[in-house]
Image (cartoon, rainbow, N blue to C red):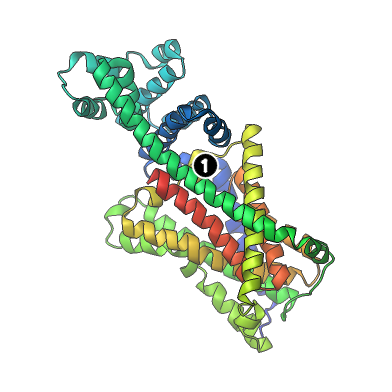
Amino acid sequence: MSGGRFAPWTTAFYAAAWLAVVVQGWGSLLDDDPIARLRHPVASAERLTTRDLELAEALDRAPSLEKRVLSGLYGTREEILAGAIGVQEEVLAGLDPGDPAADDVRARLRVLFEESGRGPEAADRFGRDRAAELLAHSAWRTPDEARDLLAARAGLRDWYADVVLVREAPPATADAARSDLLARGEVWKRRSVALLAANLLLVVVGAALLATRVRFLRELLAGAGGGPPWSLADGLGVFVRGDLWNRLYFLVLTGLLEEPGAADFPGSALAGVLLSWGTLLGSLPLLWLVHRHLLAPAGRSAVRTFGLDARPGQVLRVALSATALDLLGVHAIAWTTWGLGVLSSWAEGFDETLAWGSTGEAFLLAADYVLWAPAVEELAFRGLLYYTLRHRLGPLPAAVLTAFFFAALHFYSLPGFLMTTWSGLVWALAFERLRSLLPGIGAHAVYNALFVAGLLLVYR
């Protein structure tokens, strides 16, 4: 076939296959326990709750104004305790009752119940207090020896061990445990405040730039600009084919890594690398299809078609404005859904490779999040799907439809779906503003970089 045109029956075949893969992805999301997709659910839940609880201890002892502001953003100590109980109970529900790790989870839940003022309920549900008995009947002399004992025989470490020592140990040891607990909490607080400050700075700078361009929104929604130098059918045909091959790439690799004994397979390390950079590698067919069937027949270069030669000053202004709008909307959605009690599973936002992987694995995945995902996803959804829809639709309808597909194909729960939809809408309008992918790539990269930084700084 030549000229960049597809036979309708082949596009229909690819569309049916693509739809089947997408439906399977949504079926897995609706039927699956999110915890089951984690390789180390017990350890990951412990790490997540420990760091959050240590942060809560620091917030609880912060000066009054600082405490009010930060507790409003991250939750009060009582709310964080309640969240930790929910996380540990979710993990316990997914474990076989005979699994030795279940006893450790129950021990952590008992500590959480005691700290929440639910001691009688803890006794009814979890029986005797193993940690208190260990401290009372074992010959330990130093706080470190007590912590080693609690870790080895009760599965309690860090926050969980130290609050037991504060409650059960002699005064000198209790004071030392409290001091260590607060010192760790201060570290997580400083890092969290730094991330918060980075978010706020980006919002302020971007909002200031946006305020000088209010007229732009009216111009944008009026429908300036038109479609790309390819047909609607060809653009949709390339998108369906490219996205299908991308999803099949991930299905095959994840299937190999989930096979029994996969960790011992000689190629498992290579498969892990291929998965970490899957956004780039899985999208190579899409890049070829765009060049072969859309750009080459029109005699156009990618640089000209996707605005990669846009003026740097314009790109920076639009990217910062898009970042501000994106962060404001995402945080508003997150706080609103949280306030309404509509919550995602903690497992959805906890990337185990960033938390537990080697330095090399974490670096590769961070590069995928910050470099390859923004570039490839902006090309696929804004440069290809949105631009193609502009043949028939105005900027806002095309942006809304593209944002819906962008969010739906990420397979997130409702809060994640709403936040991703908002981001996709903002990035589509950023593309419309300059007919350049660069502002959206920049805003997308900043969003992903903040996510990666949060995980690396607080939970790694």
**Residue at horizontal 27 percent and vertical 25 percent from the top:** 176
In the rendered image, the vertical position of residue 3 relative to residue 239, given as above or below: below
In the rendered image, the vertical position of residue 248 relative to residue 452, given as above or below: below
Q: Say which quarter of the image contains residue 126.
A: top left
Q: Position of residue 326 (x, y in %)?
A: 64, 54
In the rendered image, the vertical position of residue 75 relative to residue 331, given as above or below: above
Disc 1, SS: loop
Q: Position of residue 74 (x, y in %)?
A: 53, 36
- Is residue 90 shown left or right of residue 412? left
Mark 1 highlights which residue? 32
Q: Say which quarter of the image contains residue 140.
A: top left
Q: Is residue 375 visible?
A: yes
Residue sitting at the far right: 222
Residue sitting at the far bottom: 299
Q: Residues within 10 Å of mark 1 (few under 14, many from 20)?
A: few
**Residue at horizontal 18 percent and vertical 27 percent from the top:** 145
Q: Position of residue 157 (x, y in %)?
A: 30, 31
The type of residue carrying mark 1 is: Asp
Closest to the observer, 56 or 38:
56
Q: Is residue 24 visible?
A: no
